[in-house]
Amino acid sequence: MIVFLDTNILGLVCNKNTSFDESQQCKKWFDTIFIRGVRIVTSDLCNYEVMRGLKTSSIRTGQVAPGIKSLESLRSDGFLEFLTVSTEALDLAANLWARASASGQTTRDEKDIDIDIIISAQYQLLKDEFPGQRVIMATTNLKHLSLFCEAAHWQDIKL
């Protein structure tokens, strides 16, 4: 099994606010699936979105957000694989967006970059690369992502 973390789940895993119950539960879930040998991936775009929020918080408070170190260590310690955005993924994303737009199922205004479409394209390429494995997107954004990939709330992804 391969679990692809959407931005909102990556943010929960990196959250250092120990009083935030959902974050604690999500970290336990992440640790459990990692220990059981699940391959866990995310996109560099999800990393960007989470890091952007953490750095903005750091500038506003004048203190380095603790989640920054957590996010960086996920990459450096090998707990999480970060997928780069390839030209192939961008081409597929443009195709997905055009088909969704033609059928009235767009997720964003046409002037937006629409990261959901790009990570959905990355998901589809990953699924094509590993045809015998289940690939699932862990998210809280089922409305948009389930249009383009198998997606589930992280709590519903069981082994």
Image (cartoon, rainbow, N blue to C red):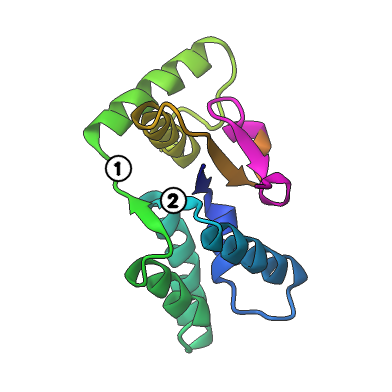
Of residues 62 and 12, which is closer to you in this image?
A: 12
The residue at the far top in this view is: 102
Asked if 50 appears above or below 69 in the picture, the reply is: above
Stretch of the chain drawn in magenta: 143-159
Q: Name the spot of residue 115 as percent of width and height, x first.
A: 45, 41
**Residue at left offset 65%, top offset 61%:** 29
Q: Name the spot of residue 77 as percent of width and height, x first.
A: 36, 72
**Residue at left offset 61%, top offset 62%:** 32
The residues tagged by marks 2 and 1 sit, at their Cα atoms, a distance apart of: 11 Å
Asked if 40 appears above or below 77 in the picture, the reply is: above
Return the residue at label 2: 42
Asked if 51 appears above or below 98 in the picture, the reply is: below
The residue at the far bottom in this view is: 63
Q: Is residue 35 left or right of residue 131?
A: right
Return the residue at label 1: 85
Q: Amino acid at mark 1?
A: Val
Q: Amino acid at mark 2?
A: Thr
Q: Name the spot of residue 104 as percent of width and height, x first.
A: 59, 15
Asked if 151 appears above or below 31 in the picture, the reply is: above
**Residue at left offset 50%, top offset 38%:** 116
